[in-house]
Amino acid sequence: MQQQPNGLIKALVIATILMGFHTTISAQQGQPFSISMNKVSLQFLLDTSGRPLYAVQFNQQPVVLPSRLGFTLNETDSVFDSGFHIIGSEQSAVDENWQPVWGEQRNIRNHYRQLTVHLQQGRPPGRLLDLVFRVFEDGVGFRYEFPRQQRLNYFIVANESTQFNMAGDHKSFWIPGDYDTNEYLYTTSLLSEVDNRRMVDSSLDIAVRVAPDRYSVQTPLMMKTKNGLYINIHEAALVNYSAMQLHVNTKDFSLSASLVPDAVGNKAYLHAPAKTPWRTIIVSDKATEILSSRMVLNLNDPTPLTNTSWIKPMKFVGVWWEMQTGKATWSYSDFADSVSAAGKPIPNGRHGANSDNVKRYIDFAAKNGIPAVLVEGWNTGWEDWFGNWKENVFDFVTPYPDFDMPALTRYASSKGVQLIMHHETSGSATNYERRMDTAFRFMKKWGYHSVKTGYVGKIIPRGEHHDGQWMVDHYNRVAEKAARYQITIDAHEAVRPTGLHRTWPNWMACESGRGNEYNAFSNGSPPEHETILPFTRLMGGPMDYTPGIFKMKGYTGYAPKRQMHTTLAKQLALYITLYSPVQMVADLPENYEAHPDAFRFIKEVPVDWDDTKVLSAEPGDYLTIARKEKGTDNWFIGSITDENKRIEIISCSFLDKGKKYLATLYADADNADWQNNPEAYSIKEFLVDDQTKLQLTLAAGGGAALTLRPATDVQVKAYAR
Ligand code: NOJ
Ligand code: CA
């Protein structure tokens, strides 16, 4: 342990007093530990009441002022956040590289210094608590560990006392602390203005849910200080615990952990030895560095899977958007009681997942080199669920009469295309758990290796929440079980990711946020939405956003007035700016066939990368990312803006020195804008090298996408002229 200079102790004492703890630091208790990594430093200490406190700075500026740690337990002696003394500590350092199975870069550096502090409560029975801090160049992670001990065996967390005391009234990008959904628009406000009841969500003409705590927000929470520091708070490795939301004190800007409760209000059921997820604070004076942080991934465990060769990033088309836009239905009959005299269901004539239509998608995928086709609405249950909201309606193994399972499996395989299974659980997680083995075996029998799961509606068992411990365990069980069957997962309406894809790379993506589909069935998401998502939802992991819509307006069915809130070129750019190893090619085949030149970008864009450079970014405003395709020398760039037109100047200095590349630029046309002229684009080809400064003109709600390939001699001659 290192005794710290007096100045630091003084700063901590003053800050602690300012925070209202009215504490002095005694010689025994108050020796702070301090560890730093470049510009990031962390201190830990116990105050005179034995309360653990920590603080974080970036470049001498406060990021987290002294803040409390610990728990309230559902035990006779509930106080587990004071009365501690330090019984030991260790420090260590790690600097290693590891290779994800898939990802934004081939090599990830994991570089941190670790401090473990062993605490014991003074009064009998002397319960033990460990705190583990990791300080990285881009932030701090910490977790609690409950060592094996006599007097804390099975126990219940009533509350986590963790706080993140902010040093000012930061600008923040937040969604309300709903226990069941993250599908909200982001509100940009000062911390002092956070109030769920004042949240304006005029675009949401489907049920607005109000969070139980009007001052709570979800993580990842993105903030910006008046001095231009970017701070992102989230968690990593959410396992056997409930999701952390944050209660915002709008007066003093302290954020307190607010765990999602179960039906009776408990937060977590633990059995020592146990660990909590990591609490993460990513910090930088550059917005681009928030996006290139790999801290959340680094805090997750390596995968236990020895063979991961079956896990393949891929693009997919699907019988899907036609349901979202109201052209087709998931169900075969309109109502559960639509049956003929003979008791046969009466078809409504608009069922999307009929064999002929599925074949059309298979043909389209095969023709365009897209590896897979998702089919939703292939199985019985939808007519019982939609409208009736009956429970346990899906068995996951019974196709509708017009979906010819054997014939479609044969057809897809003859075309070299895989089919993706769909398991809408209707929130009935118990039903799904009971049927999961059968469902996975059924998938394997019919040649399906990937499943899109979904948890629409309230959770069954009743009283559990999508983001509570019971469901967190459920999603993790599904991922682990699926891995045993060599099945990959794309989970919708699941808890938002916390980097667990490092451990379970077969859990490839989640929706867990407000996706492109809202533009079809609500008044849509404003153009800034996609500039906020990377700083919030995507900080924990890939999002199945379903980009690539080409027909911007004029949907049939129930959504005639709906429209995309982007230009077509921006839909292309989203394949780069919203990272996922599984990307949907979401529009209908006919809409792509109407724009074969722009569709070329979607055909070519990869979903797995050797390297990623975040070239420019400001949450809520704009974002430009360049990525290098895995195993090639090709680069792809996506640039997007909010509702404002913008000119982005991009330096190509990331390219190999002196090498010429042939660039294909998919840009907004001069007169494009998302509202009135979203489908106007232009395509240009030209040479670039590492000296080039690219000027990208982005329309209001627009974007630009580029492919950069090493140019052949012939191309260099032809284009140099
Ligand atoms: C909501 C999902 O986000 C969407 O993609 C899916 O089509 C529907 N649920 C039906 O399961
Ligand atoms: Ca903006």
Image: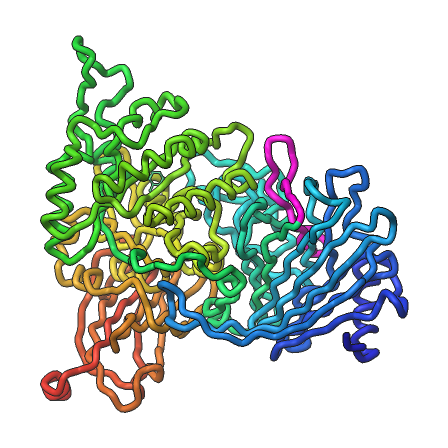
The part of the image, by quadrant, that contains residue 698 is bottom left
Residue 357 position within the rendered picture, expressed as x and y whole percent measured from the top left: 13, 38
Identify the residue shown where x is 27% and y is 47%: 449
Identify the residue shown where x is 35% and y is 78%: 650
Is residue 560 among the parts visible in the rendering? no
Asked if the magenta segment contains residue 458, the reply would be: no
Asked if the magenta segment contains residue 251, the reply would be: yes
Residue 34 position within the rendered picture, expressed as x and y whole percent measured from the top left: 72, 73
| Front residue of 312 and 494 | 312
Which color scheme does this rendered protein use? rainbow
Residue 117 position within the rendered picture, expressed as x and y whole percent measured from the top left: 73, 64
Q: Which residues are magenta?
A: 247-272
Residue 242 position within the rendered picture, expressed as x and y whole percent measured from the top left: 58, 44
Query: In the drawing, does residue 154 fall left or right of residue 25?
Result: left
Relative to 132, residue 633 above or below:
below
Is residue 404 among the parts visible in the rendering? yes
Identify the residue shown where x is 53% and y is 55%: 237
Quadrant of the frame with the N terminus: bottom right
Relative to 484, residue 650 above or below:
below
